[in-house]
Image (cartoon, helix red, strand yellow):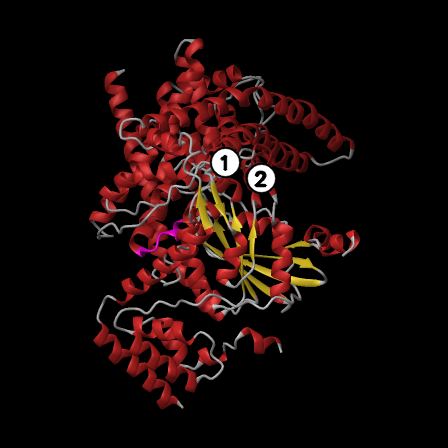
Amino acid sequence: MINKREEILKQATRYRWEIGENLHDSILESIYSEAANIAKVVVTRDNEKRKFDWDRWIDKLVTGKWTGFPIMFLLLAVVFWLTISGANVPSALLASLLVDTIHPILKSGAEYLYFPWWLSGVLIDGAYLALAWVISVMLPPMAIFFPLFTLLEDFGYLPRVAFNMDNLYKRVGAHGKQALTMSMGFGCNAAGVIAARIIDSPRERLIAIITNNFSLCNGRWPTQILIATIFIGGAVHPMLAGFTSAAAVMSVAVLGVFFSLIVSWLLSKSVLKGEASAFSLELPPYRPPRFLQTLYTSLIDRTLMVLWRAVVFAAPAGIAIWLVSNITIADITLAEYFVKNVNPYAAIIGLNGVIILAYIIAVPANEIVIPTVLMLTALTSNIAGFGSGAGVMFEMDSLSDTEMLLRSGGWTLLTGINLMLFSLLHNPCSTTIYTIYKETKSLKWTLISTFLPIAMGIVICFFVAQFWRLLV
Amino acid sequence: MTVSSNCVNCPAHNSANLVRLGIDMSNFDYVVALAGNPNTGKSTVFNSLTGLRQHTGNWPGKTVGRAEGAFQYNEKRYKIVDLPGTYSLLSTSTDEEIARDFILFGQPDVTIIVVDASRLERNLNLTLQVLEITDRAVLCLNLIDEAKRHHITIDDRLLSKKLGIPVIPATARQNVGIPELIKAVHSVASGEYICNPYKMKSQIKNVSHAVDDLEQKLKTEFPNLANTRWIALRLLEGDQRVTDAVKSSEIGNLTPAETENA
């Protein structure tokens, strides 16, 4: 039996030598011609009624040599502007409900039940307030940003972005489909890393995975949006504030794309050497998006999922924050001790100890960077009238309160800009790191993906700070 | 025929028997594979069959790997596997290999081929390749609304006759044609509808002798093997996975659908 099977295979190999290399093409040809024959008899086209072809016209515009990129930036800017200007009011409403109304009720409830001070501190001032903050700050922008992004996706715009970017990625020696994984990364880096499976070549897939972190993820959008609104919007005339801060956020996003290209280029010229492989990308027809369904799925699939993750990570982080700011060694809290010691070093790169500590606490989820920063700032700069005790996360009543707090904590426009840059260039969140490990199964590439962005962030922030101090 | 019996036979009536099971895939009676070109709406069909809300997107390559779900119809439980969208099954990429291997070795009871009605000719390339591998398939002629918008009409009855499998026009986004699709899947799975799938006829230059010879040898070695011509071509192409399956005689265990059901 075995001999017979071996014989068949040997015979096949002999034939293969006789036939030569064109077999694959001949098979394809025969498939194509039979498919064409069938299609010919069953399909009728009414060419006379053919009207103006909108798809073609739009494609010419959005993938045009001169119009493609400006339209891309414009769309991106409109999405950010809608997100920034639309999220303020619901954010404030949620905050006043969760923080100003429910928090005191919980506190007095705990008192009534004779909770020890540390227990109500850990649970209510730590875990609950962290949750309240994350929900009030993140829910509104996500509920606007994700549906908008999903509508663009449904409409068929994403492949056009990939089409525009393809040439750039090919030139840096990466795969054109990396443009698609990059777009996914704008939603969530872990999702972007998984999406890199659509790239077949292991070399190009690794490049796409390592550079996905340069796509600002939803956990970082709130940081970008808040800091841009306060420091950059605040630096210009109020009439222009919304527009300028949207432009600033977009610049950081575009800078991220730029870094992903540069790093892809460096990788493909050094450790991941090779040629870009060709691929065909079909531009799907434009389809009118289904608004209600899009709203529903993007709320369920993206907004609530992401929010849930943030909530899961925020509660323990809230507890950690409360602990570091309430455990004292020789009358100095751990947080103060860390911040004071790190401050001089952080100043070299235009940041401060608070930001560094916040990023360490926020490794599980980028979403909680801002609440942590605010809380630690209030704590370490000993400002009276803010918050209600050590380690209590709080929501400012308005943006101007937040601004006042940060400025009195020694923040300048430079701190704001560098925080935005550092938020773009730092390690991926723990979920993404774990996903990278699962996808690459390599400790080496996981470590590189983790530490490369931090190193870049430190270097870039250092140069920005030095130039800033020279010029301003 | 009375009005009431018409109602009973109407697929729309029977669709009341559909129970969407989501991801509860226990105790299934049939396995259904969902194949098709990228961006033809496979995931939309998948969602409307299972009631799941797997994220769909208007870009090719959205489904990575495969997604699974289930539904119940007429007391039978179906497990449905959403394969990655591919243009062909000649396994030149991982996606194509996943799809090809599942249809060949996974032995689904029915394969739904989702095609874009406005791009039928290109989509038929994949359809013909699927029919070379499996005997039991249903063609879902999706995006029929888009085809209409482009003034394209398709004679679905003639297409069904040509391909030898049920052809169901559909607009999955609006759930149009889904009840009929379920009905067709059911009748193919239960053996009510016997497919007579189109097999490639054209002789490929210079190789007909080699194909005939290998086919003959394969038939003697594996008398139950249905798609010998296709296997022979894969061997000639040096397809590693198929070669291994012949070597280990795994290929002989892939019994054709009819005998499996008997």
Residue A418 appears in the figure? no
Would residue B123 appear left or right of B56 to someone viewing this image?
left
Chain of the residue on which disc 2 is drawn:
A
Magenta span of residues: A196-202
2 and 1 marks in contact (CB < 8 Å): yes
Residue A320 appears in the figure? yes
The image shows residue A32 at horizontal and vertical percentages of: 35, 58
- Work out which quarter of the rendered image holds the N terminus of chain B and state it: bottom right
- Three-letter amino acid code at disc 1? Thr
- Work out which quarter of the rendered image holds the C terminus of chain B and state it: bottom right
- Residue A396's place in the image compared with A161, above or below, is above
The image shows residue A213 at horizontal and vertical percentages of: 38, 41
Residue shown at 37%/37% (left/top)?
A160
Residue shown at 46%/37% (left/top)?
A153
- State how many labels appear: 2
Q: Which residue is mark 2?
A: A297
Q: Please rate how many residues cluster around mark 1, counting C-alpha atoms within 10 Å: few if below 14, some from 14 to 19, many from 20.
A: many
